[in-house]
Image (tube, grey):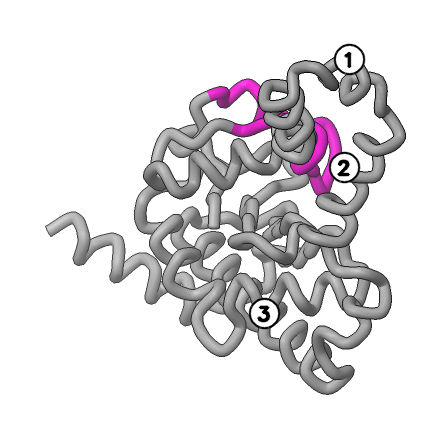
């Protein structure tokens, strides 16, 4: 999971928002400032050009090994396109039939209900902690459709006031990390639901005016305790 915030993204200018929900996958590359080398590699692997180069690597190796046939190999664009297609559509992604069989209807409904409940709980605590009274918050989750590798989930909290992508502090990011993908609704489980239901982006909205007085009081007490 890659939580998007100015403190976690190296190229923070890419986080500018003009509309909601703001999408990032396939539109811009966000470089992590935190998360370790595994997250870095997964973000890099999402780059199509790199994957195409990897798919064509056997042709490069073959040209080096059998140099007498290098020109013939280099003039085989159809074979190269077939190789890219097989890697992208068959190896890394699920076919339409496979997508439909990833989860049952009941599992998908249950998972989406759980996601909405968790998202609303997260947004409630964020709104209460910030003392927000107006506007609308959106918990936005984008997931890569590459099923055969580790899932990549871009998670952000976006506000229609601005609009802007909220600069989440450490406590807010920890709240998302601990709550959003806790079992049984893991990143992989949500990805399978999204692929089966053809959901490209999960956008759960919440209006801060709905925050109860009890939740606001709890947030105030927690803030005071943290300050002591």
Q: Is residue 201 above or below residue 217?
A: above
- Looking at the image, do the residues carrying marks 2 and 1 touch, with CB atoms under 8 Å apart? no
The label number, if any, that marks residue 11 in the structure image: none
| Prevalent SS, magenta region | loop
**In this rendering, would 185 be left or right of 177?**
right
* CA separation in Å, label 1 and label 3: 46 Å
Q: Position of residue 160 (x, y in %)?
A: 67, 40
Question: What residue is disc 3 on?
Answer: 189
Give the mark, 1 or 3, whose residue is nearer the N terminus. Answer: 1
* CA separation in Å, label 2 and label 1: 20 Å
Q: Nearer the viewer, residue 221 or 121?
A: 121
Q: Secondary structure at mark 2?
A: helix
Q: In the figure, residue 30 lies in which quadrant?
A: top right
Give the mark, 2 or 1, whose residue is nearer the N terminus. Answer: 1
Question: What residue is disc 2 on?
Answer: 84
Q: Position of residue 69 (x, y in %)?
A: 74, 18
Q: Residue at x 72, y 27 (%)?
A: 18
Q: Secondary structure at mark 3?
A: helix
Question: What residue is disc 1 on?
Answer: 71
Q: Nearer the viewer, residue 53 or 25?
A: 53
Q: Nearer the viewer, residue 206 or 34?
A: 34
* CA separation in Å, label 2 and label 3: 27 Å
Q: Position of residue 104 (x, y in %)?
A: 74, 83
**In this rendering, would 37 be left or right of 22?**
left
Q: Which residues are magenta?
A: 11-30
Q: Secondary structure at mark 1?
A: helix
């Amino acid at each position: 999971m890659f939580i998007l915030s100015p403190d976690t993204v190296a190229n923070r200018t890419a986080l500018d928002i003009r509309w909601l929900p703001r999408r990032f996958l396939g539109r811009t590359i966000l470089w992590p400032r935190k998360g370790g080398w595994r997250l870095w590699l997964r973000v890099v692997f999402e780059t199509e050009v790199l994957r195409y180069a990897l798919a064509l690597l056997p042709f490069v190796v073959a040209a080096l090994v059998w140099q007498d046939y290098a020109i013939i190999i280099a003039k085989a664009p159809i074979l190269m396109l077939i190789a890219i297609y097989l890697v992208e559509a068959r190896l890394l992604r699920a076919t339409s039939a496979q997508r439909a069989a990833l989860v049952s209807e009941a599992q998908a409904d249950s998972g989406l209900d759980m996601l909405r409940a968790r998202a609303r709980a997260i947004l409630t605590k964020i709104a209460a902690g910030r003392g927000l009274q107006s506007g609308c918050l959106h918990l936005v989750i984008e997931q890569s459709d590459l099923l055969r590798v580790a899932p990549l989930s871009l998670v952000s909290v976006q506000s229609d006031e601005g609009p802007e992508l909220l600069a989440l502090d450490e406590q807010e990011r920890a709240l998302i990390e601990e709550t959003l993908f806790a079992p049984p609704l893991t990143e992989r489980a949500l990805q399978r639901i999204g692929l089966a239901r053809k959901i490209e982006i999960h956008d759960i909205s919440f209006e801060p005016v709905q925050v109860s007085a009890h939740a606001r009081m709890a947030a105030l007490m927690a803030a005071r305790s943290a300050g002591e």
